[in-house]
Image (cartoon, helix red, strand yellow):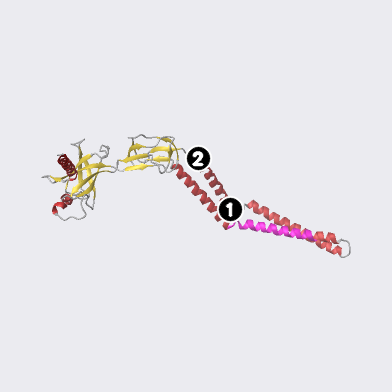
């Protein structure tokens, strides 16, 4: 008797579940040509996390709050990043001036000073040459010692060498900076610029903003906790787009077209119709064996569809059972 009782109980349970599934997936067509389907409201969830790893400074929203795209949800501490950014900007400014100095070359005053140094060196060389020549003449008659003559010759050589140095210095000033030095300075300036850009982006990442309009479903993080890319801070339920997931039986599949207008009803507002539109029809059947051999079995195949719903007041909730009604005329 116990075995019979359990067998009967299992059969009844299977019958109840089958009836519920049949109501969920069955499509009904009345005399007016209206196809009726049953489904549930679906929304997308987004796990929001900080891209930076730092302590949370403040959290600005609570669970259940409606947020707009771009709204600030929370902030991290940013003192260290602000200091590093200030340092990077100072290095960038210093390198900018260094590159400008190389590109502009010597100032006119520096070139004029170098020319004067060349002229002074030429005068000293001429004077040393004259003195050397005079001592050579007197040395032939014994009026000048050999040591004095050697000193005069050495002084002439020194002055001549200093003249060459002055002329080379002037030539370098006139030629300007080396192209290699300018390219190196430009590369360093670009590296400083990229560092500033990176730190600005990291500083921006210390502020977590809502990517889309939605509702804060879960607030996971609190001030003082360590945030990071691998730890979600919020779960955002996006309110747009919102759709109904329903199933069309195989015999009614030809009556449903993408773009078809629909009306969505819920038990909360049975006399109110939410406008909708078919946006997706699955190309494959669900809950079906791999091979279909009989006509009776083919009639039990179902195909998932998504009906996108216009709900500007955000009255339809996630998982809410709804009824979808539409005619088999696609929208133009």
Picture coordinates of residue 324, whole percent (x, y): 19, 43
Find disc 1 in the rendering and name its residue: 102
> Main structural element of the magenta stretch: helix, strand or loop?
helix
Q: Identify the disc placed on residue 268.
A: none
Q: Nearer the viewer, residue 98 or 211?
A: 211
Q: Is residue 152 visible?
A: yes
From the image, tell me which residue sits under label 2: 80
Q: Is residue 302 above or below residue 61?
A: below
Tell me the quarter of the picture where residue 125 sits: bottom right
> As displayed, is residue 87 above or below residue 292?
above
Report x, y in % for residue 81. 49, 41
Count residues near mark 2 (Cα–Cα under 10 Å), then give few for <14, some for 14-19, many for 20+. few
Q: Badge 1: how crowded within 10 Å, few (<14), some, or many (20+)?
A: some
Mark 2–mark 1 distance (CA, rounded to whole Å): 33 Å
Helix, strand, or loop for circle 1?
helix
Q: Is residue 171 magenta?
A: yes
């Amino acid at each position: 008797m116990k075995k019979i009782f359990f067998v009967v109980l299992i059969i009844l349970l299977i019958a109840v579940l089958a009836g519920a599934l049949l109501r969920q997936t069955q499509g009904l067509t009345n005399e007016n040509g209206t196809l009726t389907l049953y489904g549930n409201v679906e929304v997308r969830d987004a796990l929001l996390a900080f891209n930076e790893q730092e302590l949370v400074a403040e959290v600005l929203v609570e669970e259940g709050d409606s947020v707009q795209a771009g709204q600030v949800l929370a902030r991290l501490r940013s003192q260290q990043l602000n200091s590093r950014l200030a340092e990077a900007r100072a290095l960038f400014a210093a390198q900018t001036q260094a590159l400008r100095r190389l590109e502009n070359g010597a100032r006119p005053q520096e070139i004029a000073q170098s020319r004067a140094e060349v002229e002074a060196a030429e005068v000293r060389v001429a004077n040393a040459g004259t003195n050397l020549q005079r001592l050579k003449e007197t040395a032939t008659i014994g009026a000048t010692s050999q040591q004095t003559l050697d000193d005069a010759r050495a002084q002439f050589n020194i002055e001549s060498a200093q003249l060459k140095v002055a002329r080379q210095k002037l030539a370098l000033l006139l030629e300007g900076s080396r192209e290699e030095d300018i390219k190196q300075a430009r590369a360093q300036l670009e590296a400083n610029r990229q560092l500033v850009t990176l730190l600005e982006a990291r500083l921006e990442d210390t502020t977590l903003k809502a990517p889309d309009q939605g509702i804060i479903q879960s607030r996971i993080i609190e001030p003082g906790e360590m945030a990071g890319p691998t730890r979600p801070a919020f779960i955002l339920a996006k309110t747009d787009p919102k759709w109904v997931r329903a199933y069309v039986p195989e015999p009614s599949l030809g009556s449903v077209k993408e773009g078809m207008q629909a009306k969505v009803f819920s038990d909360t507002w049975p006399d109110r119709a939410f406008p909708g539109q078919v946006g997706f029809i699955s190309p494959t059947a669900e809950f079906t064996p791999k091979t279909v051999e009989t006509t009776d079995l083919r009639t039990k195949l179902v195909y998932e569809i998504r009906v996108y719903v216009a709900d500007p007041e955000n009255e339809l909730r996630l998982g809410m059972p709804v009824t979808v009604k539409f005619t088999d005329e696609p929208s133009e």
